[in-house]
Image: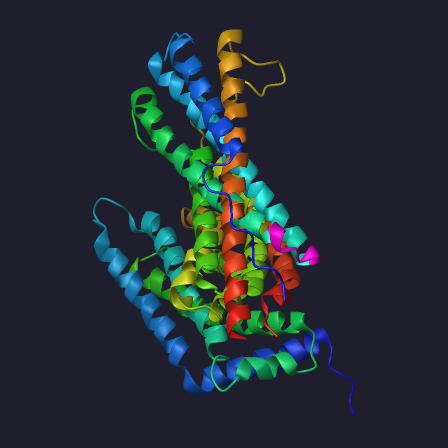
């Protein structure tokens, strides 16, 4: 008999399983992608483009789109475990409970970043943003930081709501207030980058984002086992 | 076989009556026996509802989070019933804060709503705890409900400083503290007494509401247990 795998090893196995399911069906990823593109397009027509400059509009569009397409992927993360007693099988597996959270969060991170990797160039294209290499790199960094916080909170609440009726309605109601300290700094940082202002100006926002990631990634992993039902 | 739960006493508890009398007394004093403020006039009197309600709301949510955290270790059903009751009362008082604020803001600020730091924080607090109540509402199983609610309560308490920091980076329009200051309260004594009287009355009202709501939760749980025992 092999010893039970460690926290990271089992988390990696769970993440790979989720990503393999997603890669073979591609249904959620494609839906989230199309939703993002639709949102980007609709937002453009919801404002008067002559009154508001595209660079002022883009950060908001980017982060609202990001949040909602992220929610779509997060909901699916535990939805796939609902059939054929898959969740029970996961629970009887000899792995630490924290690794279920970590594995799910890793898969969700890949999902969210994948959607974002298409949405960011799409916003740059449709809104005609003046992005050079440096701005792109900075925005990618902000995106990874925001995705970490979003995925920690989202995985936590997706696990919690998956067992309840109204799951698809309850997840956004619970998660969106928690996205405020992610979306606000991320949008401010994006605006600073797009306007070509020095990044140091927005460093207070960066601190909030970093602190949020650290606190909530850690706490969510700690309390996640309480949301599992034996 | 446990004895059937005793029939609860009918009518309001003495504590509720005392709390209501205290609130009535505080308002009689606030409306007729406290002079209006020199600049704001009668609009300032809403402070005697607004500030104590805000205090009770924060108290209620803080205690909800604490009770939830303790529940995770002690598993005492009374703690969960307290968290449930306190959260519900907290939402009611937060709603009072969010209603009285704009009523005052319109004549004094010239606007019903502004994205000021404290207003935004209170609004999000309201969102988090309405979500908390919705979550409780969709989980029929008692132990699971208590567990989920405790986790959400803890996360909600951790969220507050982050929302506070984020919204504080925007400009703030809200009046700065008048009473809780390092250089002592900047308020005439006659107003100060009324002000603290309202705080005391509202705190008493909070205790009375939570007690009544906990009694209701206990009855509901006992009824559920009796129903389960009857069919088993």
Instruction: Looking at the picture, tell me which residue is in the foreground, B114 or B211.
Output: B211
Locate the C terminus of chain A by quadrant.
Answer: bottom right
The x, y position of residue A178, in whole percent, is 49, 53
Q: Main secondary structure of the magenta part?
A: helix
Residue B78 counted in the magenta span: yes
The x, y position of residue B1, in whole percent, is 63, 67
Residue A208 counted in the magenta span: no
Instruction: Looking at the picture, tell me which residue is in the foreground, B228 or B162.
Output: B228
The x, y position of residue B87, in whole percent, is 50, 46
- Relative to B171, residue A228 above or below: below
Which region of the structure is painted magenta?
B73-79
- Relative to B64, residue B170 above or below: above
- Left or right: where B110 falls relative to B12: left
Colour treatment of the image: rainbow
In this rendering, the count of numbered labels is 0
The x, y position of residue A157, in whole percent, is 51, 63
* Residue positioned 34% across, 17% down in the render: B43
Task: Note whether residue A154 is visible.
Answer: no
Instruction: Looking at the picture, tell me which residue is in the foreground, A61 or A227.
Output: A227
- Relative to B73, residue B231 above or below: below
* Residue positioned 36% across, 13% down in the render: B40
* Residue positioned 61% across, 51% down in the render: B78
- Left or right: where A4 falls relative to A80: right
Task: Note whether residue B205 is visible.
Answer: yes
- Relative to A113, residue B103 above or below: above
- Left or right: where A31 falls relative to B182: left
Locate the N terminus of chain A by quadrant.
Answer: bottom right
């Amino acid at each position: 008999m092999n010893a039970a795998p460690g926290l990271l090893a089992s988390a990696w196995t769970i993440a790979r399983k989720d990503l393999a399911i997603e890669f073979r069906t591609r249904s959620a990823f494609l839906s989230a992608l199309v939703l993002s593109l639709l949102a980007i397009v609709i937002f453009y027509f919801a404002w008067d483009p002559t009154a508001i400059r595209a660079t002022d509009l883009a950060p908001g569009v980017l982060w609202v789109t990001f949040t909602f397409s992220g929610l779509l992927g997060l909901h699916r993360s535990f939805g796939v475990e609902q059939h054929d007693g898959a969740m029970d099988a996961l629970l009887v597996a000899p792995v630490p409970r924290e690794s279920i959270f970590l594995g799910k969060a890793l898969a969700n991170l890949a999902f969210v970043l994948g959607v974002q990797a298409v949405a960011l160039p799409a916003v740059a294209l449709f809104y005609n943003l003046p992005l050079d290499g440096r701005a792109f790199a900075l925005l990618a960094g902000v995106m990874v930081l925001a995705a970490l916080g979003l995925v920690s909170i989202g995985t936590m609440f997706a696990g919690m709501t998956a067992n309840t009726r109204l799951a698809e309605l309850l997840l956004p109601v619970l998660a969106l207030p928690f996205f405020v300290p992610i979306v606000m700094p991320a949008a401010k940082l994006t605006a600073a980058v797009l306007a070509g202002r020095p990044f140091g100006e927005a460093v207070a926002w960066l601190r909030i984002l970093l602190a949020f990631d650290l606190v909530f990634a850690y706490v969510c992993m700690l309390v996640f086992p309480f949301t599992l039902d034996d | 076989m446990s004895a059937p739960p005793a029939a609860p006493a009918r009518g309001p508890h003495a504590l509720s009556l005392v709390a209501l009398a205290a609130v009535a007394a505080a308002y009689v004093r606030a409306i007729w026996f406290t002079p209006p403020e020199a600049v704001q006039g009668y609009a300032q009197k809403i402070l005697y509802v607004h500030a104590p309600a805000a205090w009770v709301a924060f108290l209620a949510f803080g205690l909800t989070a604490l009770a939830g955290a303790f529940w995770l270790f002690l598993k005492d059903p009374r703690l969960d019933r307290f968290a449930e009751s306190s959260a519900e009362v907290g939402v009611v008082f937060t709603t009072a804060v969010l209603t009285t604020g704009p009523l005052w803001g319109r004549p004094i600020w010239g606007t019903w709503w502004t994205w000021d730091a404290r207003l935004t924080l209170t609004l999000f607090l309201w969102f988090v705890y309405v979500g908390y109540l919705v979550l409780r509402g969709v989980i029929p199983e008692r132990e699971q409900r208590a567990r989920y609610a405790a986790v959400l309560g803890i996360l909600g308490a951790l969220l507050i400083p982050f929302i506070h920091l984020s919204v504080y980076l925007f400009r703030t329009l809200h009046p700065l503290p008048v009473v809780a200051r390092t250089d002592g309260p900047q308020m005439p004594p006659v107003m100060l007494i009324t002000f603290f009287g309202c705080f005391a009355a509202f705190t008493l009202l909070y205790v009375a509401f939570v007690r009544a709501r906990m009694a209701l939760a206990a009855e509901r749980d006992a009824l559920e247990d009796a129903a389960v025992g009857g069919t088993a």
